[in-house]
Amino acid sequence: MKMTFKAFAKNLFGAKYERLQRSIFVCLIVFWGLHITDWKIQIAPFIRYLMLSFLTAGVMWQTLCAEENAARMQNMLMLPFDNRNFVNSYIAALGAYTIFTRTATLFIVLLAVSDWKPIEIGGSAVCTINAVLMTAAIYSLKKYWYVCIPWAVTVVAGILLFGNTAWMLPPLIVSSIFAAIHLQRTDGYIFCSQKEQKSYRLKQHRHFAVWRYLFRYLGCHKNYLMNTAIMWCVALVLPYFLGKMENLAVVPMGFAILSINTPVCILLSCDPDLEQAVRFLPGQKKAFCIPYCLFIFVCNMAANAIFLCSWQNGITAFMIVTAVFFALQSAILSVLLEWFFPIRNWKTESDLWHHPRKYIVPAIMLLIAAAAYSHNSSL
């Protein structure tokens, strides 16, 4: 088991575990920076548990679904292996990657800005471990949704109802034990199930090839569509919070927040074969970048339109023009980043989705929105 775990861990953390070292160093810097500010906020324990659980489960699920991991597993499955050790090593490696590279950052931030009791730290550890084991178990049982959904709902309900007391721990421990027992009996081949590869290459169509490619790519990656749907839900409720400020200058801030739609902005980075074809084939720079920019613009405008329809204080022509401006500018900047600064040397799709580059365009849009807000306030 030790050798199998090392094989998976080195694929995720690097040959010398440099990603793990870098993650721990960043967490220490973040904790120290927030701790010396002495800035504290009140966060209920069950809110912290939910945040840690949902983040861990989301990243773990995304990592399990990564096609790159499935390709690596196929190579390892060609060799003789003990099924139980193989599954334990695989889940342990993915769990360690999820916890130390993603969950640890959120935990450090919460630890620095809020007051914790020792039992709450233990509760956070139980929630995180349960999220890893439960997500892996549900992934292996995803065909039996009628079992997975009640299980997940029961765990979330338990955290909501008993998250502020110690009564939350026994159900989570039972859930973790149940997931661990199920994983001991799970076939290792179930974790390397390849998705059906649909044909969505540019060369198959002469007209509207880029649009066909983009829509087919999203059709093959349902989690990308899910992220877009979540952004639309954010666009639906965001006016409720910004509307309380009773200042039209906050509307651009909403448009800037809605520009954080990572999946549609990394389609060149996540497909190295496409990037190579686009860069080497003649005339592809203009043929690809312009439709790609329009595609992101349409996605941004859909979210902005939902935002405007949910705005309760009346829509003006200035707000519509601002929505178009922010959608177009964020699309242009996103395409420029993809063309000149593509993300390379990533291990899983989680690395792409959580790469610091994703905040560059929203940060620029927020600066523009803040400048508009300051100008309006001065008037």
Image (tube, rainbow, N blue to C red):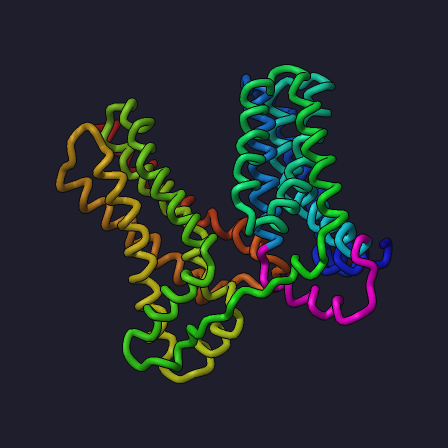
- Viewer-proximal residue among 241 and 75: 75
Seen in the image, is 197 located left or right of residue 118?
Answer: left
82 inside magenta stretch: yes
Which quarter of the rendering shows the C terminus? top left
Q: Quadrant of residue 289?
A: bottom left
Residue at left offset 55%, top offset 19%? 161
In the image, residue 335 sits, relative to residue 35, either above or below, namely: below
Pinpoint residue 108: horizontal percent, then vertical percent. Answer: 65, 32
Pinpoint residue 213: horizontal percent, then vertical percent. Answer: 38, 70
Labels in figure, total = 0
In the image, residue 174 sits, relative to residue 324, either above or below, namely: above
Seen in the image, is 185 located left or right of residue 67?
Answer: right
Seen in the image, is 196 located left or right of residue 33?
Answer: left
Residue at left offset 32%, top offset 53%? 299
Residue at left offset 46%, top offset 66%? 268
The answer to whether any part of residue 28 appears in the image is no
205 inside magenta stretch: no
Residue placed furthest toward the bottom: 282
Seen in the image, is 79 located left or right of residue 335?
Answer: right
Residue placed furthest toward the right: 2
Pinpoint residue 377: horizontal percent, then vertical percent. Answer: 25, 27
Residues shaded magenta: 65-84
Which quarter of the rendering shows the N terminus? bottom right
Q: Quadrant of residue 120?
A: top right
In the image, residue 344 sits, relative to residue 109, either above or below, namely: below
- Viewer-proximal residue among 372 and 296: 296
Pinpoint residue 208: horizontal percent, then vertical percent. Answer: 29, 74
